Image: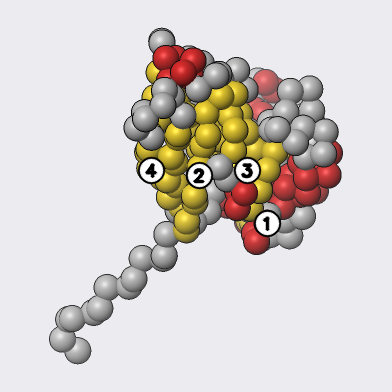
Amino acid sequence: MGDRTNFCIVHVQCKHGHPSCKRCLAGLNNKCHICRQPIGDMRCRPLENVLAGMTVPCAFARFGCQEGVRYTERAQRHGHEASCQHAPCHCPFPGCSYAGAAAQLFAHIRGAHAAGSPSAVSSIRCTPVALPRGMPFHVLLREEDSRVFLLLNGGDVPKGRSLSVVCVAAAGEAELYTMAVSGGAPGALSLSASGSVPRVRRWVRYPTGGFLFVLDTYWRASGGSVSVTVHVKKLPPPELEEDTTAA
């Protein structure tokens, strides 16, 4: 029947009724693996009906998901797993291999990294944070819903740094961030940006767009560190449009 990610729902049978996966026949030279009789296009409906009634657990069951999807509904399964709130999220700290659901990642970072890296982890309520130029990210924890945000400090742009915000979580409700950066020479204007908060399960690269550009001269005038304030707010769900059609 194939494995969980490469399953086959079409089964055919030889004249003796021995079923075989349609996809596997090419490797068997279109012959029955039991009696070696040729296999044509005669479908094995009883087996297909059994498969149609089967459900398989979510790929993230070991992380707490209790949902099941039909074995034959590949698109449904992929759609569920793409938005599953139990999908593992990966710790961003170098050398740490921890992965767990978003709430578990929150507890892990607070327990395993916050005390040892106080300059790299803080509550999002406690901003502004002092962000050194060479620090690749700062973790912002939101206690009320156990969310993990990363204030990213990318060095992938010329003559400056790119500041952006992402949420380490599975797909969910839309959120917006506002960010303000102060520092620079005395009397320098503060910098600000706003935008939607992308969600990622694993941080692997800095965004190529949607960031706040901070010139190297701004960092140097600030002694190599700037003050960053971040606010994140959830967007209200879209209101249902009133049905104006006549009854």
Report x, y in % for residue 76. 54, 52
Pointer 4 local density, CA inside 10 Å: few below 14, some 14–19, many at least 20? some
Look at mark 1 in the image and give the residue it sits on.
143
Q: Is residue 244 above or below residue 51?
A: below
Secondary structure of the residue carrying tag 2 is: strand
Question: What kind of residue is marked 3?
Answer: Leu
Which quadrant is home to the N terminus? top right
**Mark 1 Cα within 10 Å, few/some/many (few <14, many 20+)?**
some
2 or 1: mark nearer the eye: 2
Q: Which residue is mark 2?
A: 230
Sequence-earlier tag: 3 or 2? 3
Q: At numbered mark 1, what does the secondary structure look like: helix, strand or loop?
A: helix
- Mark 2 or 4, nearer chain start: 4
Residue to which mark 4 is pinned? 195
Residue 21: in sight, yes or no? no
In 3D space, how far apart are the residues under numbered discs 3 and 1 (Cα atoms)?
Answer: 10 Å
Would you say 134 lies left or right of 60 here? left
Q: Amino acid at mark 4?
A: Gly
In the displayed structure, would residue 160 be above or below residue 188?
above
Give coordinates of residue 143: x percent, y percent: 68, 56
Q: Label 2 vs label 1: CA separation? A: 15 Å
Residue 78: quarter of image: top right
Query: Crowding near pointer 3: few (<14 within 10 Å), some, many (20+)?
Result: many
x and y, in percent, of residue 40 in the image: 58, 34
| Residue 15, image x, y percentages | 68, 40
Quickly name the residue at label 3. 140
Going from N to C along the chain, the mark reached first, 1 or 4, is 1
